[in-house]
Amino acid sequence: MTEIIPGLQGDLPAGSRKGVPYVAGNTSDLFFTLSWHGKNVAACAKHYVGDGGTTNGINENNTVTDWHCLLSIHMPGYYTSIIKGVSTVMVSYSSWNGVKMHANGNLVTGFLKNKLRFRGFVISDWEGIDRITSPPHANYSYSIQAGISAGIDTVVMVPSNFTLTFQVKNKIIPMSRIDDAVRRILRVKFTMGLFEDPLADTSQVNQLGSQEHRELAREAVRRSLVHLKNGEGADAPLLPLPMKAPKILVAGSHADNLRYQCGGWTIQWQGLSGNNLTSGKRQFNVSVLRDLL
């Protein structure tokens, strides 16, 4: 991220160049952490690797490129993060040349851990292990074996599946792989001081969701929006719209669906349909035309 929103990511260091990957924080001798009120927060580099180059830009799609392109275009951010000592790396849902990243041992273990000497631990994305198969969760036993063997150290966000225990006890997954994962997780925990101070500081929990936080969230949204061209030119702008415009056509399947327009990771994981979760709406007379194409 090269665009810093004050109060959200931190402050851009003096001399930083626009367009150069930047991770905010302080460099320690062993691990890179974010400094927040004197506490350490482990940084996570994601999503490893190539998720920005998928075919047609589609989420969870396939990145088709050669080795040189992968290293020169998609990998540099991880070089910088690992040099800084980033604590964790999250794997991408996407594939590289047809191989799911969650099952790509050559890139996760061979390159990230062995070649780049990454010493932290590797995290799955939400149900990323499940998505090794198509359809997702079609063969969870296989997915666990493929993902853990590839180098995934912790299957986050889905803690209630115990297939891994069976596979270790039956020597499908070697204990050496578990030892490596445990060693990496404990290294981060020791570095973070979690054995000396395991509980979170809750003294400021009542400030969460304050008006200041909400205004900062709104500012983050404003700064993140993609702006479209305003009309044909400066002399003929489309916006602001006249209050008495006779008719306005808004096209697209989500044109009249506020929840869908908010996208994923807002109200639910992948977003959902509806217009009934907002207050203070101003109602206009709108006619929705469907199935025009």
Image (tube, grey):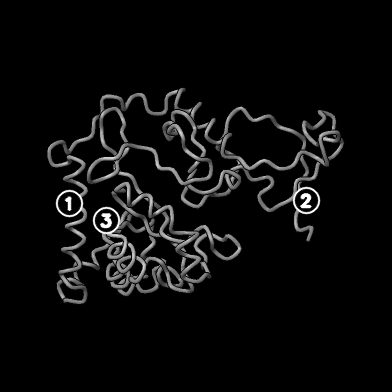
Q: Which label number is shown at residue 178?
A: none
For residue 107, side relative to residue 230 (left or right): left
Is 215 placed above or below 61 here?
above
The quadrant of the image that shows the C terminus is bottom right
Report how far apart the C-alphas of labels 3 and 2 lie in the structure.
51 Å
Residue type at the position of mark 3: Phe
* Residues packed near mark 1 inside 10 Å, few (<14), some (14 to 19) or many (20 plus): some
Residue type at the position of mark 1: Leu
**x, y percentage for residue 140?**
33, 70
Residue type at the position of mark 2: Leu
Q: Mark 3 points at which residue?
A: 121
Q: Nearer the viewer, mark 3 or mark 2?
A: 3
Q: Mark 1 points at which residue?
A: 186
**x, y percentage for residue 211?**
46, 23
Report how far apart the C-alphas of labels 2 and 1 lie in the structure.
57 Å
Q: Which label number is shown at residue 289?
A: 2
Residue lying at the far front in this picture: please name it: 15
Q: Which residue is drawn at 30% across and 58% down?
A: 122
Is 37 placed above or below 76 here?
above
In primary-sequence order, the first of circles 2 and 1 is 1
In primary-sequence order, the first of circles 3 and 1 is 3
Report how far apart the C-alphas of labels 3 and 1 lie in the structure.
9 Å
Q: Element at badge 1?
A: helix
For residue 281, side relative to residue 135 (left or right): right
* Nearer the observer, 78 or 202: 78
Q: Residue at x 85, y 33 (%)?
A: 235
For residue 20, side relative to residue 117 (left or right): right
Q: Which of marks 2 and 1 is in front?
A: 1
Q: Which residue is drawn at 12% across and 38% down?
A: 196
Q: Element at badge 3?
A: strand
